[in-house]
Image: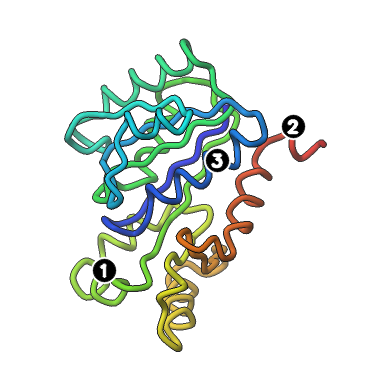
Amino acid sequence: MDVFIIGGFLGSGKTTMLLDLAKVYTGKGLKTAIIVNESGEVGVDGATIKAEGYSATELPEGCICCTLVGTLQATLRNIKRDLDPDVLIIEPTGLALPHKVKQFVHNAMIDEDSCSIIGLADVERFDTLLEKKEAFYKMQMSGSDLILINKMDLAKPGQIEHIKAWFEQNFPGKPVQEVSAKTGENMDKLYDFTLSKRPRDRSS
């Protein structure tokens, strides 16, 4: 089972990204399960996700980094035992630290094949977020294996370059790609990254 954690601040587009990624995997015939720790800015809940054809588990209010650690680990073990999916996508609350979630995944001892973090940056609110919560934002992005600058379709001239420069300064060498989950632009970069994590896809 390959695990993907989609991290990012509130409203960065995590739920839209989650659904797009899930569609790619189910389209390849892979059993996909989802854990959601917040309803998301588009109002997607467990029932709606299930209606899309995915196995979804909603965690109650609270953060899976702290108050819901035990609940998360029990949920992980139940999903592994009952569903044994090929892929598990986790959407933590926007106030969670994804690298902590990754550690809890390992601690749950579900024998995952890989566990990767996809960090989302919001073009529209990037500077405001840095102004108010830069230290927290650095911690939230620190464990990302891939950083996506989302909502590129709304970017003003120079914004993408400005955000990329900030990430290069603070996380040199970390892959950063601008995308738009809404329009689909550059989303193939995300799909290529996630599919490369699957041993059977690499060998095919």
Asked which quadrant contains residue 36, the reply is top left
| Label 2 crowd bin: few (<14), some (14–19), many (20+), radius 10 Å | few
Q: Residue 23's spot in the image, x, y percent?
A: 55, 40
Residue 200: which disc?
2
Q: Which residue is mark 1?
A: 134
Left or right of residue 95, residue 92 in this image: right
Q: Name the amino acid type tagged 2.
A: Arg
CA gap, disc 1 and disc 3 = 33 Å
* Contact between labelled residues 2 and 3, with CB atoms less than 8 Å apart: no
Question: Judging from the image, what secondary structure is the residue with disc 2 in?
Answer: helix
Asked which quadrant contains residue 69, the reply is top left
Left or right of residue 171, residue 24 in this image: right
Front one among 118 and 48? 48
Q: Name the amino acid type tagged 3.
A: Lys
Asked which quadrant contains residue 65, the reply is top left
Q: Name the amino acid type tagged 1.
A: Glu
| Label 3 crowd bin: few (<14), some (14–19), many (20+), radius 10 Å | some
Q: Is residue 88 above or below residue 130?
A: above
CA gap, disc 3 and disc 2 = 19 Å
Image point (45%, 33%), residue name: 52
Question: Judging from the image, what secondary structure is the residue with disc 1 in?
Answer: helix
Q: Is residue 7 above or below residue 80?
A: below
Question: Judging from the image, what secondary structure is the residue with disc 3 in?
Answer: helix
Q: Which residue is mark 3?
A: 23
For marks 2 and 1 on the same chain, the one whose residue lies earlier in the sequence: 1
CA gap, disc 2 and disc 1 = 39 Å
For marks 1 and 3 on the same chain, the one whose residue lies earlier in the sequence: 3
Q: Residue 184's spot in the image, x, y percent?
A: 54, 60
Q: Residue 198's spot in the image, x, y percent?
A: 67, 36
Q: Residue 163's spot in the image, x, y percent?
A: 42, 76
Foreground mark, 3 or 2, reads 3
